[in-house]
Amino acid sequence: MPLYRDEAVVLRTHKLGEADRIITLLTRHHGLVRAVAKGVRRTTSRWGSRLEPFTHVDLQLAEGRSLDVITQAETLDPFHSRLGLDYERYTAGTAMLETAERLVTEEKQPAVQHFLLLVGGLRAMAAGEHGAGQVLDSYLLRSLAVAGYAPSFDHCVACGTEGPHRFFNPSAGGVMCSMCRVAGSATPAPETVVLLGALLAGDWAVVHAADPRHRKEASGLVAAYLAWHLERGLRSLAYVER
């Protein structure tokens, strides 16, 4: 079978037979890949913890008819060893993994931006320099932007009038002016809209200075925006502490 090498982040695993696992991966050059790790569940397995969710690995794979087969694995960054010690960061990280799998829909298609964004997000989550909820919200907004669903927080999405604007509508794609607003639009505080723009841009000075109530409101709007574009919410988001 033809071999190839790639970097990957392990998104999830599930059992196959008595000793194997199917590993779902987001790779740097081949996008979403599902591969078999043979014998990984045996106590004598050479894989150890290298193929657990959150792990950033360098892999060699053999192309298969339906599923590829992992033949070598080397750990590059064991994010799970740090995230597993903090429930808040672990659950937020789990939501990131689920988002990556949901947004990268085509298997074996390059998704370099999604891969780099996920690695950077997990690195920030593990470092602990920023709040877990804010790292997650920033990652979700940026992932949606990479997928083609970038929200607007400074111009009306209907007429293009420069803001600030008070109305936000997930189905419309961002903020709306008073003339264009549609029924059911949210009316977040002006500070919340500024915070959303900072999360999308990665302006951490603004994020750190935000009031907790505006962070909470922003998280709710990010979740609503994500659910609209995914057509259903993330299962893991229900366990994230907000």
Image (cartoon, grey):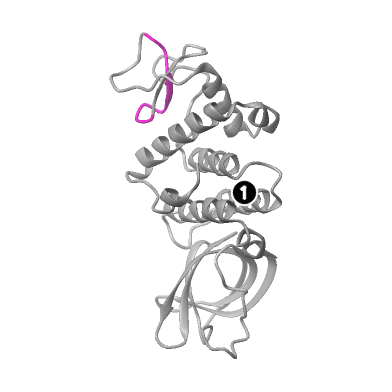
Residue name at image x 44 percent, y 61 percent: 107
Q: 10 Å neighbourhood of mark 1: few (<14), some, or many (≥20)?
A: many
**Main secondary structure along the magenta-highlighted residues:** loop
- Residue 100 vertical placement versus 32 (above, below): above
Q: Position of residue 69 (x, y in %)?
A: 51, 79
Find the residue positioned furthest to the bottom. Answer: 44
Q: How many marks?
A: 1
Residue name at image x 49 percent, y 18 percent: 189
Residue name at image x 56 percent, y 51 percent: 88
Question: Quick check: 195 left or right of 188?
Answer: right
Q: Secondary structure at mark 1?
A: helix
| Dot 1 amino acid type | Gly
Between 7 and 109, the one lying in front of the other is: 7
Question: Quick check: 225 left or right of 70?
Answer: left
Q: Which residues are magenta?
A: 170-178
Between 193 and 231, the one lying in front of the other is: 193
- Residue 60 vertical placement versus 159 (above, below): below
Residue name at image x 60 percent, y 43 percent: 135
Between 165 and 105, the one lying in front of the other is: 165
Find the residue positioned furthest to the top. Answer: 179
The residue where tag 1 is placed is: 121
Question: Quick check: 161 left or right of 73?
Answer: left
Q: Position of residue 129 (x, y in %)?
A: 71, 44
Residue 40, by quadrant, is bottom right
Q: Position of residue 104 (x, y in %)?
A: 46, 53
- Residue 173 vertical placement versus 72 (above, below): above
172 is within the stretch colored magenta: yes
Residue 204, by quadrant, is top right
